[in-house]
Amino acid sequence: MSTEDLRVRTLLRAFGDDAFARWLMPDRAHRHQVYREWFTMVLAHTETAGRVISSRDGLAVQVWLSARTGPPSMLADADTQRLYDLAGPRAHRFREFGALSAQRHPHEPHEYLSMIGVDPAVQGTGVGTRELRESLRKWDAEGVPCYLEASSARSRNLYLRLGFGDLGGPMLLSGDGPTLYPMWRTPGQSSAVRSFD
């Protein structure tokens, strides 16, 4: 399996069946088909618009987008339309999330952790924490703040331990959508040693 395929597989295994994914697309087979192509496009775009950081075994993948000179985008414009086409009748959910995320996104220069996925086979072993700490040390050394949207109360608590703080109130998605938590980390913010994953 190629490195790119392994990164897509890790992201799909990490996110393909979580509450946010089920809200976007209830049908699992369609969801996995769309997510596989979506993640492939995100990784390709991020290679030029940010940084994809993988653990040596490819079982932890971070997707960082640079927002130092303007708002970040997870996809190139043509890929965004491709995603909507793939999502079909569920495209409105992707649009809703995109609009809400853009509305809440901070304007100050920063690095945006659009996703960090850890393969379920190694979740709970500390690999996610270790990998993320390395990235945070890099941004700290450069004096750059970080932003993310935690996708659950559990992940919010873990990010709090890594020096992130809430940025405004939660993001509320329509219907039965999960609550998302915008979070900000100033450079050099202290963090405890508890595991991220």
Image (cartoon, grey):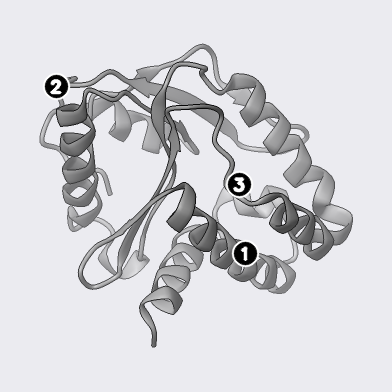
Left or right, 108 with reference to 39 = left
Mark 3 residue crowding within 10 angstroms, few (<14) / some (14–19) / many (20+): many
Which is in the foreground here, disc 1 or disc 3?
1
Residue at 59% x, 63% y: name it.
41
**Where residue 51 appears, x then y in whole percent?**
37, 51
The tag earlier along the polypeptide, 1 or 3, is 3
Residue designated by label 1:
35
Left or right, 133 with reference to 83 = left
Residue designated by label 2:
190
- Nearer to us in this view, 148 or 26: 148
Mark 2 residue crowding within 10 angstroms, few (<14) / some (14–19) / many (20+): few
Name the kind of residue labelled 2 in the image: Ser
State whether residue 90 is above or below residue 5: above
State yes or no: discs 3 and 2 in contact (Cβ < 8 Å).
no
The tag earlier along the polypeptide, 3 or 2, is 3
Q: Can residue 195 be seen in this view?
A: no
Quarter of the image that includes the N terminus = bottom left
Q: Is residue 191 visible?
A: yes
Residue designated by label 3:
20
